[in-house]
Image: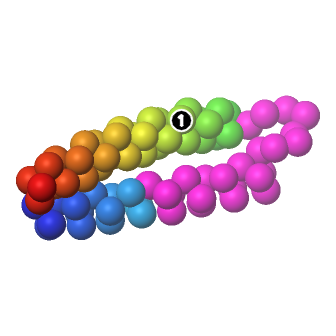
């Protein structure tokens, strides 16, 4: 069980890092442009997907924490 939580934390860290990179790129190359690049639209979609995936990890993680607390009790 500890191993699964550790893998989940690593996956969350990777998702957060990927979101950070995309946000930096978007800030430099996409935001404030008069004509939006096609790449920027794809980037927006990818960031929405990553945020959804991150939310699912966070909800799964809270369920695991509650299960562990119940087991410990």
Residue 36: image location, x then y, percent: 78, 34
Residue topped by disc 1 = 48
> So how many labels did they put on this image?
1
- The magenta span reads 15-37
> Which quarter of the rendering shows the C terminus?
bottom left
Across and down, in percent, residue 16 comes to: 49, 57
Is residue 46 at all visible to an observer of this figure? no
Q: Is residue 37 left or right of residue 57?
A: right
Q: Which residue is nearer to you in this view: 18 or 7?
A: 7
**Vertical relation: 21 (above or below) 29:** below
Q: Magenta includes 27? A: yes
Residue at point 87%, 40% (across, down): 33
36 magenta-colored: yes
Badge 1 crowding class, 10 Å Cα cut-off, few under 14, some 14 to 19, many 20 or more, is few
Identify whether 40 is placed above or below 26.
above
Q: Residue at x 41, y 61 (%)?
A: 14
Pinpoint residue 35: horizontal percent, then vertical percent.
85, 32
Mark 1: secondary structure: helix
Secondary structure predominantly adopted by residues drawn in magenta: helix
Q: Is residue 11 visible?
A: yes
Camera-side residue of 59 and 27: 59
The picture places residue 55, in percent across and down from the top left corner, at 42, 40
């Amino acid at each position: 069980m500890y191993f699964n939580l550790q893998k989940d934390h690593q996956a969350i860290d990777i998702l957060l890092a990927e979101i950070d990179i995309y946000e930096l790129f978007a800030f430099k190359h996409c935001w404030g442009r008069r004509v939006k690049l096609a790449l920027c639209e794809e980037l927006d979609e990818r960031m929405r997907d990553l945020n959804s995936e991150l939310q699912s990890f966070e909800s799964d993680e809270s369920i695991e924490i509650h299960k562990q607390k119940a087991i410990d009790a």
